[in-house]
Amino acid sequence: MALPREPRQKMINLMYLVLTAMLALNVSSEILNAFKTIDKSFSVANNTINEKTNTLFASLEEKLKDPKSSQLAAVWAPKAQKVRQLSEEMLNYIEDIKTQIKNESHFDPETGKYKESDLDVPTRLLIDKKMGKALFQKLTEYKNFVLAIDPEIKSQFENSLPLDLTVPKVENKENRTWEAAYFRMTPSVAAITILSKFQNDIRNTESQVVEFAHNKIGEVKVVYDEFQALAAANTQFLLPGQEFTITAGVGAFSKNAKPTVTIDGAVIPLNANGLAEYKTVAGSPGTYSRKVNISFLKPDGTTSTLTRDIQYTIGAPTGLNISADAVKVLYVGLDNPISVAGGSGTNAKDLRVSISQGSISGSNGKYMARVTTPGTAKVSVNDGKQSVSYDFRVRTVPTPTAMVGESKGGRMRVNDFKAQAGVRAELENFVFEGVKFTVTSYTITFTGAGYTEFMHKSVTGNSFGPARSLIEMAKPGSTITIDEIRAEGPGGNRLLAPIAFNLF
C-alpha cells in the first residue's frame, strides 16, 4: 500500500498502527496467561481420563482370558480397541496442527517459548490454508465412525457424545463457519488451547465408549450354597524370632469368585485352597493388632466386606514391654496410643517412659505419643532397675482420596452429580479410625454437552456452592474434572489426585 502524501493522513495511519500494537500488547500481557492456565488444566484432565481408560483395557484383557467372560469379551474388546485406534489417530492429527502453530509462531526448542500473541498464524494456517475446514471434516468423520462401530453404541451415545461440533455463537457475521468462529484472529496460545479442548472431547469420548463396551460384558454371577468369612492366627503369644501366621478367606466359597483379602491395607495372594496366608517374624516385644479385610461376592451378586482384628503379643525376656496399640508405626500429627507393661512385681506407676522425638504423656501403662518427623522414634522405659528401648517407624498419614459423594470418578448420572454438596477427602483403609481431612480448595472444569466453550472455576473450601450455576448447566455427555484439590489434615496440607466425571 502506497503511503499517503498528506502529512495529516500519515499521522492518522501512524496512530492507527500504534493503537493496534497497544491492543496486541494488552492481549499478550493479561488474557494469554489465562489461556495457558486452561491449557494446563486440559493436560491434567486428559492424563486422568487416559489412566482410567487404561485401567478399563487392562480389565478387558483379563475378561478375554477368563473362560466365564471370554465369549462376550471377544465381541466387545475389539470394538473398544477400534475406538482407541480412531481416537489416537485423531489426537495425533490435532497434535500436528498444534505443533505447526507453535513452529510458525517462532517456537524456540531450547526455552519452549513461542510468540503466544501472534494473531496472524492461526488465521493463515486454519482459515486461509483451510486446515480448520479439514479439521472439522476429520472430527465429523471420527464422530460418525465411533457411532458406527456398533448399533448399541450409536443408540447410547448418538445424542450425548462429548464431542460437540456445533458452530459457536459469534458477534462478527463474517465468522459464520466453524473454523472461522474458533480460529479467525485468535492468538496462537488461544488456538492451541481450543485444539486441546477438542483433544479433551476425544479422550472423554474414548473413555465413555470403552467403559460402555466393558460394562456390556458384565460380571459373572456366582452361586454359593453357604459361606463364612474366616480369619485366624496360629498363636496369640510369641517370643522374638518366632513365626506369626494369619490365615483368612471365605469358607465354602466358589472358585469362580475367590475372595480379596487385605491385611493392614496390603493385598494378600490366595493359596491353592483359596485362603490368604500372611506370615511375618515376631520382632520387638509388645502387643500388636492386624486389620484383616475380606471382600467376597454374595449369592445375590453384591459384594460384601467383613473386617476382623487379629491381636497377638510378643513377649520380652526382661519382662518390660512396650507396644503401639494400633500398629508398630507412629504417625505424624496424630495421638498414637502406646501401652507399657513392667515385669513381675513392678507397679505401672513406677515406670518412667520417654521418646527420642516429639513428646509422650500418660501414666499407669497407657501413654499417648506425638511425633514430628518421619523416620524412627525410640521409646524407652525404665522401672528403676533396668531400661529397655524399642524403635518405632514414624510415617506421615497417607494422602486421602478425593471423592464426590461415594464416587472417585467415572460415570455418574447428571442429577446424581447435581445433588452433591461438594468435594470431600476420604482416608481409605487406614488403621486409625476417625482421622479426618478437610478440602480447602479446588478447581473445577466443565466441557462437553451443555458447555459451548471450556469453563472453569477456582473454589476456596469444599462446597460446590460457588460453582453451582455452572454445575446446573450440565447435561448427559458433559465432563466435569476436579483438580488442584488441596486438603488440610494431620501433618499439614496435601495435594490430592484429580478426579473426572462423565455424566450420562
Image (spheres, grey):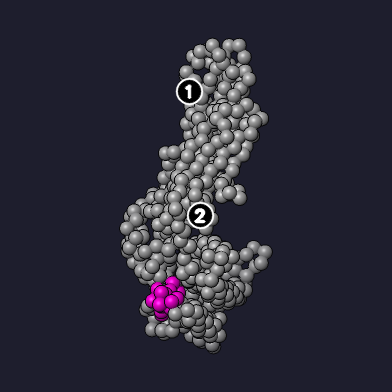
Give the residue at mark 1.
366
Give the residue at mark 2.
254
Q: Which residues are magenta?
A: 152-167
Decide which of tag 1 and tag 2 comes sooner along the chain.
Answer: 2
> Which mark is drawn over residue 322?
none
Determine whether, in the image, residue 159 is placed left or right of residue 62: left
| Residue for point 34% across, 56% down | 420
Quarter holding the C terminus is bottom left
Q: Secondary structure at mark 2?
A: loop
User: As shown in the figure, which amino acid type bears the numbered disc 2?
Assistant: Ser
Whole-Å distance between the Cαs marked 1 and 2?
Answer: 45 Å
In percent of width and height, residue 31 lies at 46, 65
Residue 464 in view, yes or no: yes
In percent of width and height, residue 85 lies at 57, 75
Q: How many marks?
A: 2
| Residue for point 45% across, 76% down | 153
Determine whether, in the image, residue 465 is placed left or right of residue 247: left
Q: Quadrant of residue 453?
A: bottom left
Q: Main secondary structure of the magenta part?
A: loop
In percent of width and height, residue 278 lies at 59, 41
Q: Of residues 248 and 126, which is closer to you in this image? A: 248
Q: Quadrant of residue 156?
A: bottom left
Q: Secondary structure at mark 1?
A: strand
